[in-house]
Image (cartoon, rainbow, N blue to C red):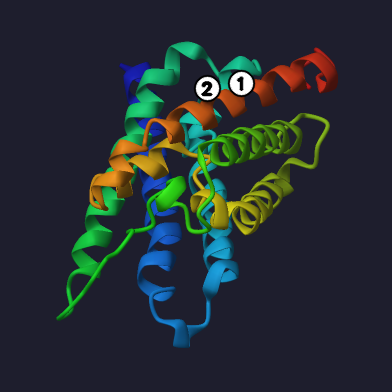
Amino acid sequence: MANSSSNLQKWSAEFLGTFWLTFGGCGSAVLAAAFPELGIGFVGVSLAFGLTVLTGAYAFGPISGGHFNPAVSVGLALGGRFRAAELPGYVIAQVLGAVAAAGVLYLIATGRPGAVVGGFATNGFGEHSPGGYGLTAALLTEVVLTAVFLLVILGATARRAAGEFAGVAIGLCLTLIHLVSIPVTNTSVNPARSTGPALFGPSIALDQLWLFWVAPIAGAAIGALIWRALLSDGFGD
């Protein structure tokens, strides 16, 4: 019974953290960035995503570890920081959190006369890429940036690191990732974040969703393997 309660707390924390990441990050793009006079642009959206992870890490991280991302959970499992047996519960909670956030955001975004949600902060390549970048560019971007993201997470949360600042490092890393990749894919590095908006956005987002599961998970696996081969000290890091 105690273990079940612990799991429920962890799943709830992952649901809420992923809800916050998707609602706050995608909400800044769908609601605020839709009005040029507000002037938040790519930089504002990038900061919003970073701030959701930073605040979520301190609010929910002590309960679940603060993954909020199926690729991160896979990478941490491969990096020896997370039990693989816990993956299904985490991934389900993360996807449900992202879908719930996208649903609430859609209701808000369509709550004014003449509302047009457009791309609804979805991810894509080719004609669905903000900058018109093709499949190969999108794949490389998502793989490389997710690998780096995982390396930063593993490094910032290592025993030898200043753990109280891990949330800051991870949040700023995600901000930088968005500054680089919004023009290419509208930035995923997170399959759950991609799935929620895709269910409410244009049909092309669902058609291309596969890439935003495959590439981030592959990138996270690469990051974990690099960490274990070159950076881990073998004693809990």
- On screen, 6 above or below 56? above
> Toward the viewer: 125 or 162?
125
**Mark 1 vs mark 2, CA separation in Å:** 7 Å
> Toward the viewer: 71 or 117?
117
Amino acid type for the residue under numbered disc 1: Ala
Q: Quadrant of residue 166?
A: top right
Taking the spot 73% from the left edge, 41% from the top edge, the residue there is 163
Location of residue 65 in the rendering, given as x and y in whole percent from the top left corner? 54, 34
**What residue sits right under mark 2 in the picture?**
74
Q: Left or right: 61 with respect to 102?
A: right
Location of residue 76 in the rendering, given as x and y in whole percent from the top left corner? 60, 24
Most distant residue in the bottom direction:
37
Taking the spot 41% from the left edge, 58% from the top edge, the residue there is 26
* Mark 2 neighbour class, 10 Å CA radius: few under 14, some 14 to 19, many 20 or more: many
Task: Check residue 221 in the rendering and tell me which mark sits there, or answer none.
Answer: 1
* Mark 1 neighbour class, 10 Å CA radius: few under 14, some 14 to 19, many 20 or more: many
Location of residue 225 in the rendering, given as x and y in whole percent from the top left corner? 70, 17
Sequence-first disc among 1 and 2: 2
Most distant residue in the left direction:
113
Circle nearer the viewer, 1 or 2: 1
Amino acid type for the residue under numbered disc 2: Val
- On screen, 78 above or below 91? above
CB under 8 Å between discs 1 and 2: yes
Q: Left or right: 62 with respect to 108?
A: right
Q: Secondary structure at mark 1?
A: helix
Location of residue 101 in the rendering, given as x and y in whole percent from the top left corner? 30, 52
Taking the spot 70% from the left edge, 35% from the top edge, the residue there is 157
**Quadrant in which the N terminus is drawn:** top left
Q: Secondary structure at mark 2?
A: helix
